[in-house]
Image: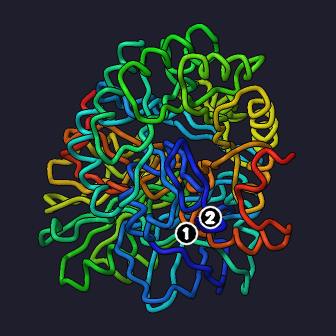
Amino acid sequence: MKQSLLTVISNNALTSNVYELKLSGIEGMNIRPGQFVNVKTDGNYLRRPISVCDAEGDILTLVYRVAGAGTAEMSTWHAGKKADVLTELGNGYDLSAAGEHPVLIGGGVGIPPLYYLAKELKKQGKTVSAVLGFNTASERFYEEAFREVCDDVSVTTADGSYGIRGFVTDALPEHPTCSYACGPMPMMKALYRTLACEGQFSLEERMGCGFGACMGCSIQTKSGNKRVCKDGPVFRKEDLLWED
Amino acid sequence: MGRLSVELCGIELDNPVIPASGTFGFGYEFAELYDINCLGTFSFKGTTKDPRFGNPTPRIAECSMGMLNAVGLQNPGVEAVIHEELQKLKPVFHKPVMANISGFSVDDYVYTAQKLDAEEQVGWLEINISCPNVHGGGMSFGTDPDAAYEVIHAVRQVTKKPLIAKLSPNVTDITAIAKACENAGADAVSLINTLLGMRIDLKTKKPVLANTTGGLSGPAVFPVAVRMVYQVHKAVSIPVIGMGGVSSAEDVIEMMMAGACAVEIGAANLVDPFACPTIIEELPAVMDKYGIENLTDIIGIA
């Protein structure tokens, strides 16, 4: 973990409530795909945990949805604003589990952390598929970015207004070697039931600290009690207790 | 003794800054961030006889200038604390540590206290009779003077180490509980634990916390804590450890002026992992600003 005072480079709306925030200023940035950062916002006591969408050179990219007071405040940030951010939090995805043809499956604001992962997997020469799920066409973001990086990209919308009508489970490729997933809990549980291959699942939980001190975000797994922030947020699908 | 040194039940602390139980784990993870030997000491995660997962999530809610938690005493149980957690702490912390103990019966408290009393590195036993997030134990011992007396008296029989009773603010008269603990043989009291609170999600129209209620901490509770430390300091003759929303060197000094001989820092650690070393570093300059030569000069001066 590192605490840094970062500088906002840009903060642009991608949809009506999803923003792309670019920050600079982390010395010796060493962030793995699937890790997250914890952002101090003005007027709110606790930090806001946000997954890392990209970390390239000196630029950290976060894509976040305005969900409450903290992210609403973040959406007002302009270039030059200084932000107190804890970085390098959580374990991140295990890239060694990928095999030759991994599939990345994201739903809504669960999609951003998969972008950095896709880039890193491509660097390793993998054949990368992505399935991006949205509620409706107007909520789409980062489709082009994924198309530039991945070998094939499927987009689903729940209302059928774009791409494949339905959910990510309706657009899974055949016989992937590993799945990397992040999204809302109903999607994650559907994938848990559907996927035959190994999985690296990124979970979300309301956090206190984000670095393992408060036990606010604990879950029970097959290998004991785990903190989503410190032992996760990425867990092996096979370790989750979601049989019900 | 340095300007920041204080004494806590016969043990000298380099400074009065003590991370509070439940906000610092078992210390070793913070040792990856800074040398935790800069602290006065710290109070480790509340330990019970048996392992506990705690409450379902969400366990955390937020409010203006503070937070609510309903963790529910998640801990690996006293055996694992002794054989795993304290073993990891030993190489990185070279001072006496404060053991924080919870239970659901008098026998539970006695069992856990006896085990931790035998640990060389444990300098003090802090008995938590004030956890608001568990049922059938915890706070129920800290809201009735007779029950508080019973627990502290029973634990007193099994330890010669300094015994600290951690008190709940969720009472009509905290001085009555503090006096009962003093009469039962406590060497000190620490206060305040969290204030019982609740938030409701307007979208779901349901409580935010899975446990419905949780303990409020952070700057929002600081004035309540200062008031209670002040009252208890006047009511008992044993030392008082102050806590509740302390976030700065100024807050430490204010808490000591109210009567605290040492100060625990909780929620601030969760927002800023470097809160404690920052406060310790800033104390001398703030003392200079207010003409304070030694911290021991201001205890209870208000």
Q: Residue furthest bottom?
A: A57
Image position of A155 (left or right of B270): left
**Residue B149 at x, y percent in the picture:** 56, 13
Which quadrant holds the N terminus of chain B? bottom right
The answer to whether residue A171 is seen in the rendering is: no
Of the residues under marks 1 and 2, which one precedes in the sequence?
2
Q: Chain of mark 1?
A: A
Q: Residue at x 25, y 40 (%)?
A: B82
Q: Quadrant of residue B108?
A: top left
Amino acid at the residue labelled 2: Val
Q: Nearer the viewer, mark 1 or mark 2?
A: 1
Image position of A225 (left or right of A60): left
Q: Chain of mark 2?
A: A
Contact (CB < 8 A) between labels 1 and 2?
yes
- Say whether mark 2 and mark 1 are on the same chain: yes
The answer to whether residue B98 is seen in the rendering is: yes
Q: Residue at x 73, y 81 (%)?
A: A81
Amino acid at the residue labelled 1: Val
The local crowd at label 1, few if under 14, some if 14 to 19, many if 20 or more residues have their Cα within 10 Å, is many
Q: CA distance from mark 1 to mark 2?
A: 7 Å
According to the picture, the residue beneath numbered tag 2 turns out to be A18
According to the picture, the residue beneath numbered tag 1 turns out to be A63
**Residue A68 at x, y percent in the picture:** 69, 51
Describe the element under mark 2 as helix, strand or loop.
Answer: strand
